[in-house]
């Protein structure tokens, strides 16, 4: 499969592209529907060539029309096809009705879905609900989705898994868990954020031969942030005459009592991502322990905020938050860091303290997980996860700078004149404490090497996610430790490393 396009679109935008293709370009709607059906069946047949019994579950809109095309093609290929409809087939209109009539003419008579057990089929095709869904799934559609999920058989979703919100990736009550989703004309944002990556499975794209000029004047809702594209563009070879000062000096502030690991991991990640010098400001008792274990980190014992002043004068970028805590020590160090005229990466407890006393500045990168984002916006995690792009935009609007909303499909939102970026690399093995500390160090290191805050955030997220994928390829997802990413950060931060 060729790499997916970079642009992500909202459902309304894709519907407009569809309209332009039909009304202005002159492509007949039934032709687009036929192409969608053929693209879906080709993807399914390629992945499950031994399937013999196929169930196609159709709804009452154009998504269902695609399903009728798929059913006919599967029958022509010699498979045993059972065609279900959920809801009232009398609601079919236009191209979908034409496709249904063609299926009937071929001898495929749809029968109502009445809680049928789908476990006896080799392959299921979800052509139930399309991108127009905006409310909770109910009735026969809900029963059909639950039956597909309970069947234990692979599901191919047409355009989007039924029940998944096309713009936010939120599950609207219940949603199909597909093995493959074949999507058309434009990639939908919801496939790559929220619950989308879990529900969509492998995403296959077909433009249905709609000419690029249909999309040329439109602004994407977001862009896909892929390491294969981002890293070569942002991490060129170094000059042969580079010295350590030219690679930047990062100061990581954190590591209150009992939280030594966080600040150390952030510092190590900064080194492995290319910072020329990395200093740590931590508790006095921690400094010799870090120096013994990691002599390349310059660990300084700091017990008062004013002790930071000399350090801050010597560094290029400050990362504050890993293991900082919320006690007086951490609060004092944070206030001094915020007062310094240095670019900042703000994470962990520094974000929680910021939520208590909000302020804004243009030269920082905030890296909240959903819980921290909820505190920054005085809301709850469910509201953040319901629309992650909107949440990242709200954090950026309130606090300025760049927001990196971590999680599956990490969102990078800089100045709103540019679309946000949604990460497509990474894996569930990275759901472990300490991964965020590494990301803080990575972004700070890239800023110290001269990348602007938004470019450093985008590249740092891509590098961090790709390192996680590299580490998982070596040993699997369960049991992944943050430090397993460190050698991969170094490998991938160098030209050619992403191709090794």
Image (cartoon, grey):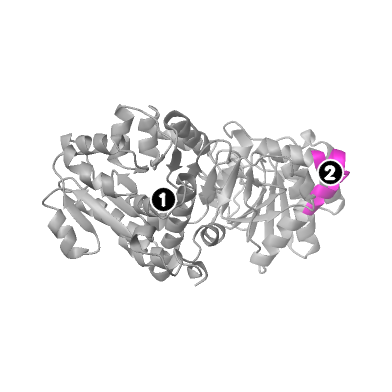
Residue visible at 59% across and 50% down in the picture: 117
- Distance between mark 1 and mark 2 Cα atoms: 49 Å
Q: Position of residue 222 (x, y in %)?
A: 59, 43
Q: Which mark is residue 90?
A: none
Q: Position of residue 127 (x, y in %)?
A: 69, 47
Q: Along the line of sight, which residue is nearer the eye, 166 or 249?
A: 249
20 relative to 235 in the view: left or right: right
Residue 296 appearing in the image: yes
Mark sitting earlier along the chain (1/2): 2
Give the secondary structure at mark 1.
Answer: helix
In the orientation shown, which residue stands out farthest toward the front? 241
Figure quadrant of the N terminus = bottom right
Residue visible at 84% across and 46% down in the picture: 30
Give the secondary structure at mark 2.
Answer: helix
User: Does 221 appear in magenta?
Assistant: no
Question: What secondary structure characterizes most of the magenta part?
Answer: helix
Residue 104 appearing in the image: no
* 1 and 2 marks in contact (CB < 8 Å): no
Q: Which mark is residue 29?
A: 2
The range drawn in magenta is: 20-35
Q: Which mark is residue 447?
A: 1
Q: Position of residue 229 (x, y in %)?
A: 57, 59
Query: Dot 2, crowdedness within 10 Å: few (<14), some or many (≥20)?
Result: some
Q: Position of residue 175 (x, y in %)?
A: 56, 43
125 w.r.t. 336: above or below: below
Query: Dot 1, crowdedness within 10 Å: few (<14), some or many (≥20)?
Result: many
Residue visible at 22% across and 39% down in the picture: 333
363 w.r.t. 474: above or below: above
């Amino acid at each position: 499969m060729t790499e997916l396009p970079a642009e992500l679109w909202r459902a309304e935008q894709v519907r407009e592209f569809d309209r332009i293709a039909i009304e202005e370009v002159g492509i007949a709607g039934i032709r687009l529907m036929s192409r969608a059906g053929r693209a879906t069946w080709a993807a399914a047949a390629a992945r499950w060539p031994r399937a013999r019994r196929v169930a196609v579950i159709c709804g009452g809109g154009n998504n269902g029309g695609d399903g009728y095309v798929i059913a006919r093609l599967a029958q022509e290929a010699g498979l045993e096809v059972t065609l279900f409809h959920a809801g009232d087939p009398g609601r079919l209109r236009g191209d979908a009705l034409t496709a249904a009539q063609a299926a009937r003419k071929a001898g495929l008579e749809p029968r109502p879905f009445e809680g049928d057990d789908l476990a006896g089929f080799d392959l299921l095709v979800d052509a139930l609900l399309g991108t127009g869904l905006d409310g909770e799934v109910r009735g026969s559609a809900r029963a059909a989705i639950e039956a597909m999920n309970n069947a234990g058989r692979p599901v191919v979703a047409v355009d989007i898994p039924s029940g998944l919100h096309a713009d936010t990736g939120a599950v609207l009550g219940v949603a199909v868990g597909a093995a493959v989703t074949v999507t058309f004309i434009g990639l939908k944002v919801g496939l790559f954020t929220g619950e989308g990556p879990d529900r969509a499975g492998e995403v296959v794209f077909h433009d249905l031969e709609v000419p690029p000029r249909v999309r040329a004047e439109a602004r994407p809702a977001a862009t896909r942030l892929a390491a294969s594209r981002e890293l070569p563009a942002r991490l060129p070879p170094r000059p042969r005459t580079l010295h350590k000062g030219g690679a930047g000096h990062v100061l990581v502030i954190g590591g209150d009592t009992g939280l030594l690991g966080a600040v150390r991991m952030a510092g190590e990640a900064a080194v492995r991502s290319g910072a020329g010098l990395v200093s740590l400001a931590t508790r006095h008792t921690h400094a010799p322990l870090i120096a013994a274990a990691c002599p390349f980190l310059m660990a300084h014992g700091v017990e008062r905020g004013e002790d930071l002043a000399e350090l801050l004068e010597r560094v290029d970028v400050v990362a504050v938050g890993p293991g900082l805590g919320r006690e007086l020590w951490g609060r004092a160090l944070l206030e001094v860091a915020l007062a310094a005229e240095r670019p900042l990466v703000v994470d962990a407890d520094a974000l929680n303290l910021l939520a208590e006393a909000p302020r804004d500045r243009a030269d920082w990168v905030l890296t909240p997980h959903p819980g921290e984002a909820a505190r920054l916006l005085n809301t709850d995690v469910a509201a953040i996860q319901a629309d992650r792009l909107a949440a990242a935009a709200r954090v950026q609007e309130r606090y300025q700078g760049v927001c990196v909303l971590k999680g599956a499909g990490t969102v990078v939102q800089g100045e709103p004149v540019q679309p946000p970026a949604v990460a497509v690399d990474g894996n569930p093995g990275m759901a472990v404490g300490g991964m965020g500390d590494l990301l803080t160090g990575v972004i700070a290191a890239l800023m110290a090497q001269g990348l602007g805050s938004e470019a450093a955030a985008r590249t740092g997220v891509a590098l961090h996610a790709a390192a996680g994928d590299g580490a998982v390829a070596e040993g699997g997802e369960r049991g992944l430790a943050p430090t397993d990413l460190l050698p991969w950060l170094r490998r991938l931060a160098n030209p050619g490393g992403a191709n090794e």
